[in-house]
Amino acid sequence: MFEKATRPALTWASLDRAAHLREDRDALIALRADPRARALPFRKRDPLLVGEDLGTLGWRRLDDPLVAGAELIFLGLAQGAPRYAASLGEVEPPEGDFVEMRASLLGGAFGGDDAAIASSALALVNWHRTHGHCARCGEKTAMTQGGWRRDCPACEGVHFPRTDPVVIMLIERDGLCAIARNVNFPENLYSCIAGFVEPGECIEEAVARETREELGLSTGRIAYVSSQPWPFPMSLMMGCIAETTDTDFTLEEAEIADARWLSRADVKRLFDGGWDDMAPPRKAAIAGTLLHDWVDGKIGWT
Ligand SMILES: [Zn+2]
């Protein structure tokens, strides 16, 4: 519906996931022996970033002592060369530094294709770190299929990486949009509201429910705009736009500290730093993309 919508950060990575190779044991062994193979080390949840401003992925050869003994997750192929994530414990960086990815991304030093690749890697690293035991019988599970599955030796249960769907919505009323300050946001940050999709809900139902719960607004038209993987720890943000005719907010006090209606000119001023008491969402987050696109007239009904 909104063909001109901007692609959010962390999407359309150049890496070929080569999913057909995950079940091919011989192919996986051959890939490990490829001299062009590289692994991206993670110290717990933090990727190794190198270069000026720590903006580049710190790929290591597979015989590098840092990653040589580590369990490797097969991410895919970069121009035919295998790429892996290596999940490590407490280690010293050989160069650069292990960096908290969310802060680095939002800070703007790290982005583009590197961030999109690291996003998949981090979601998988996070999943393996928290799903070491079988959800059916409690036994320890083992990584299979190049890291895209965990199998239970006791009950033969198979477990696939998890992605948690979240709706995030720009709410529009007659040329205005609603922005809100979550109680957990940094001071002065205003953004779109968001919430997890519950079991049994479609995207539109989740948008309508969250909008009613958090801001007390009923919704009319609801449309999907674009989505963004958000690996903190393993979400998929589904960006939507929703229409309302209600004017007065009824805030969910446990979650929302304040909400305001802003015009396109007001939002533009927000991004230009023109408000003393409000700061905008960062460009790398889909809320920033949605709001920029709305200001530019790429999305919206009014
Ligand atoms: Zn089991």
Image (cartoon, rainbow, N blue to C red):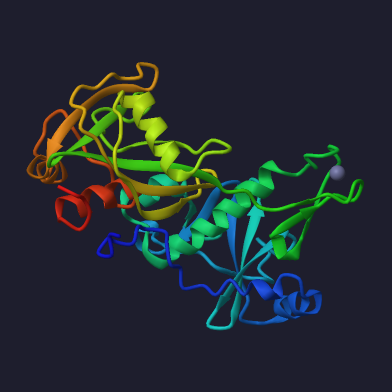
**Quadrant in the rendering for residue 187:** top left
When the figure is inspected, residue 17 is found, relative to residue 232, above or below; the finding is: below
When the figure is inspected, residue 181 is found, relative to residue 285, above or below; the finding is: above
Q: Position of residue 168 (x, y in %)?
A: 37, 42
Does residue 92 appear in this view? no
**Quadrant in the rendering for residue 194:** top left
Q: Which residue is drawn at 42% across and 54% down?
A: 228
Q: Is residue 12 left or right of residue 177?
A: right
Farthest residue to the top: give it: 253
When the figure is inspected, residue 278 is found, relative to residue 17, above or below; the finding is: above
Q: Where is residue 54 in the image (x, y as percent from the top left)?
A: 40, 58
Does residue 300 appear in this view? yes
Quarter of the N terminus within the rendering: bottom left
When the figure is inspected, residue 24 is found, relative to residue 218, above or below; the finding is: below
Q: Which residue is drawn at 34% across and 31% down?
A: 211
Give the number of callouts: 0
Which quarter of the frame holds ligand 1?
A: top right
The residue closer to the viewer here, 190 or 220, is: 220
Farthest residue to the front: give it: 220
Q: Position of residue 105 (x, y in %)?
A: 38, 51
Farthest residue to the right: give it: 154
Q: Position of residue 242 (x, y in %)?
A: 29, 42
Q: Which residue is drawn at 75% across and 64% down?
A: 145
Q: Which residue is drawn at 62% across and 48% down?
A: 162
